[in-house]
Image: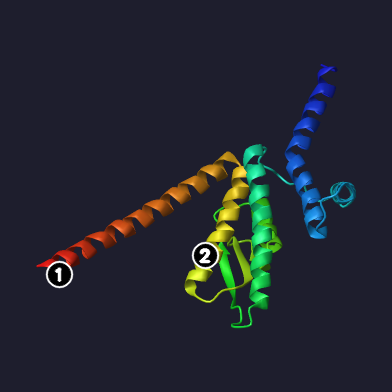
Amino acid sequence: MTPDLPQSRVRRAVITVWRQLPFFVWLIALWMLLWGQFTWLAFLTGLIAAIVVTRIFRLPPVELSGRVNLWWGFVFVLEFLVAVLVGSLTVAWQVLDFRRQPGAAIIAVHLRTDDDLIMTHTGVTASLIPGSLIVETDRDRRILYLHVIGVRSDADVEKQRASVLSWETRIVRAVGSRAQLQAIRADAAAARATTARHASGSHPSGHTSGQGGGR
């Protein structure tokens, strides 16, 4: 029984490291994004900062899903970089466009996933993209409040809200649990079904009107 004890400890240590690895990597990536540098120096300083945060300033252990999808993680990084570039160009154009002032609004986004890390990652991602910034969070109701610019209509508000929810979906696909992934898929399927019902409900009235006009 004695030889099994070290093996069980090693096994638990490996499981713990594997579960905490995405959080550790996220701290390094966040450090590099905040400094705006993707260099070896930024990586090494981010590594030191992550070690200090996780080892010296000990917090209660973060329960991760234990699921990492490398493909969706890669897709998330690519889409995030594109969104940062597009957001920077959009904000620059709004500043230089003297014909009209860019509208601004505070919008509330109700997240679908009841998870602290998913909520944090979604909020950080939205804040790092130029044009939007998290101003408040409501953990109990899973609501993010964002200040966004370039908003002039209700359609723009809904577009911004859908953008935040899409980032939540990407994060869940990359590091969320299987239950969270299934919930996201079910919600998306329900949304598509609702849209299809609305679309099918609007076509018959328009078709009847067209027949009446022809007669």
Percent x, y of residue 22:
73, 43
Few, some or many residues within 10 Å of mark 1 (<14, 14–19, 20+)? few
Residue at 78%, 31% in the rendered image: 14
Percent x, y of residue 88:
69, 65
Which circle, 2 or 1, is nearer the viewer?
Answer: 1
The residue pinned by badge 1 equals 213
Q: Is residue 69 visible?
A: no
Quadrant housing residue 68: top right
Label located before the other in sequence (2 or 1)? 2
Front residue of 13/24: it is 24
The residue pinned by badge 2 equals 159
CB atoms of marks 2 and 1 within 8 Å: no
Residue at 81%, 53% in the rendered image: 32
Quadrant housing residue 97: bottom right
Few, some or many residues within 10 Å of mark 2 (<14, 14–19, 20+)? few
What is the three-letter code of the residue carrying label 1?
A: Gly
- In the rendered picture of this protein, how many numbered marks are placed on residues? 2
- Tell me: 207 left or right of 47: left
Q: Which mark is residue 98?
A: none
